[in-house]
Image (cartoon, rainbow, N blue to C red):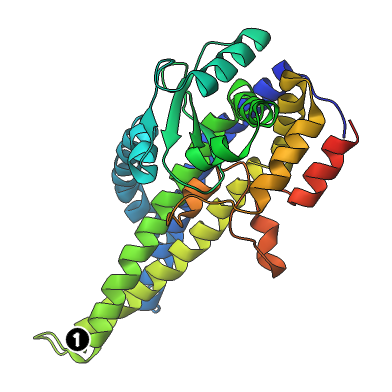
């Protein structure tokens, strides 16, 4: 694997974050324009006017930008509390757990980075992840199962892996990607539910006072909206490639370097692979942050996996 310095990686991640911030609104607005185009074409096939579509788009665009912008800002700056609430994590001090606190502190002193928050999740499964967007919110979270199962060297390797994600700004980039995918996913889900309810209520058979099948028009609009949202969702899923498998390799390399023992991290990954996960939380957005993704992706869908195979990661660590 080609070596990439930490400053180079930070610069790449910052640049990619900016591209994502620009690319997502572009995808979303493109789908809005496509929705307006198809609806206008269906309802006015005889008198179709591209200028009308563009005018409707210009009138709609500010509302879309403002709503999505507010949604993104709220999610971006509240992500730490949302992750904590979803996982049931709680913060600790040195007095609460001297072992994990000292390991994190020693590693941060080794690499000269500020001390992040340390969160614990009471769960027998083995997992760890890093989160946060700045020095005030950077957090390393580990489960009690992980601390019970790993020795100090193995635990240091895992913590070093997560600290490398923070140093490389991977957490900020990942959270940006998660929010983008989540917005489109929510829109698509809402449209799908409304569409199913209208179909179940027989709305497609209702006619307005002028004899037009208003219910059918609404159903067609919702179907078109659902298709457009699905297309947008597919393209935003591709942003997961921004959190590429190579970043996990780099975090493994960084963790091995920080703890000074690549074999200890390899041993930790092997143990974690036997019982990964986090309670009953089966949320893809949170699973992307885990050191090992708990649910295997098979077939063509594995192209969207953000984590490389655990066997390959262990093999590379054992070759250090």
Q: How many marks?
A: 1
Q: Position of residue 71 (x, y in %)?
A: 32, 41
Q: Quadrant of residue 219?
A: bottom left
Q: Which secondary structure lies at badge 1?
A: loop
Q: Is 267 situated left or right of 14 in this image?
A: right
Q: Quadrant of the C terminus?
A: top right
Residue positioned 76% across, 26% down in the render: 256
Residue positioned 20% across, 82% down in the render: 214
Q: Is 259 situated left or right of 227 in this image?
A: right
Q: Is 17 situated left or right of 139 in this image?
A: right
Residue positioned 32% across, 55% down in the render: 56
Q: Which residue is mark 1?
A: 201
The correct choice, above or below, for 311 with respect to 129 in the image is below
Q: Is 111 situated left or right of 85 in this image?
A: right
Q: Position of residue 274 (x, y in %)?
A: 65, 54
Depth check: 44 or 101 in front?
101
Q: Quadrant of residue 318?
A: top right
């Amino acid at each position: 694997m080609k070596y990439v310095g930490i400053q180079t990686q930070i610069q790449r991640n910052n640049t990619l974050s900016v591209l994502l911030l620009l690319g997502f609104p572009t995808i979303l607005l493109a789908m809005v324009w496509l929705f307006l185009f198809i609806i206008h074409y269906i309802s006015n096939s005889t008198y179709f006017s591209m200028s009308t579509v563009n005018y409707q788009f210009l009138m709609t665009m500010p509302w879309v930008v403002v709503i999505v912008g507010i949604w993104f800002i709220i999610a971006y700056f509240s992500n730490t509390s949302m992750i904590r609430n979803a996982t049931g994590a709680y913060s600790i001090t040195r007095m609460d757990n001297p072992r994990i606190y000292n390991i994190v502190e020693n590693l941060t002193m080794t690499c000269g980075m500020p001390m992040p928050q340390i969160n614990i999740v009471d769960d027998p499964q083995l997992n760890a992840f890093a989160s946060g967007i700045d020095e005030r919110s950077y957090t390393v979270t580990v489960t009690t199962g992980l601390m019970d199962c790993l020795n100090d060297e193995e635990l240091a390797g895992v913590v070093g892996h997560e600290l490398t994600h923070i140093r490389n700004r991977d957490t900020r980039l990942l959270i940006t990607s998660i929010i983008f995918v989540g917005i489109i996913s929510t829109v698509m889900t809402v449209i799908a539910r409304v569409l199913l309810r209208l179909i179940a209520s027989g709305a497609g058979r209702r006619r307005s006072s002028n004899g037009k099948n208003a219910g059918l028009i609404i159903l067609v609009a919702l179907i078109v909206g659902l298709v457009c949202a699905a297309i947008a969702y597919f393209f935003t899923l591709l942003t997961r490639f921004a959190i590429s498998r190579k970043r996990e390799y780099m975090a493994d390399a960084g963790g091995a370097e920080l703890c000074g023992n690549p074999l200890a991290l390899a041993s930790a990954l092997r143990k974690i692979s036997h019982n990964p996960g986090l309670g009953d939380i089966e949320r893809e957005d949170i699973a992307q942050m885990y050191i090992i993704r708990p649910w295997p992706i098979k077939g063509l869908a594995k192209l969207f996996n953000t984590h490389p195979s655990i066997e390959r990661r262990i093999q590379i660590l054992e070759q250090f």
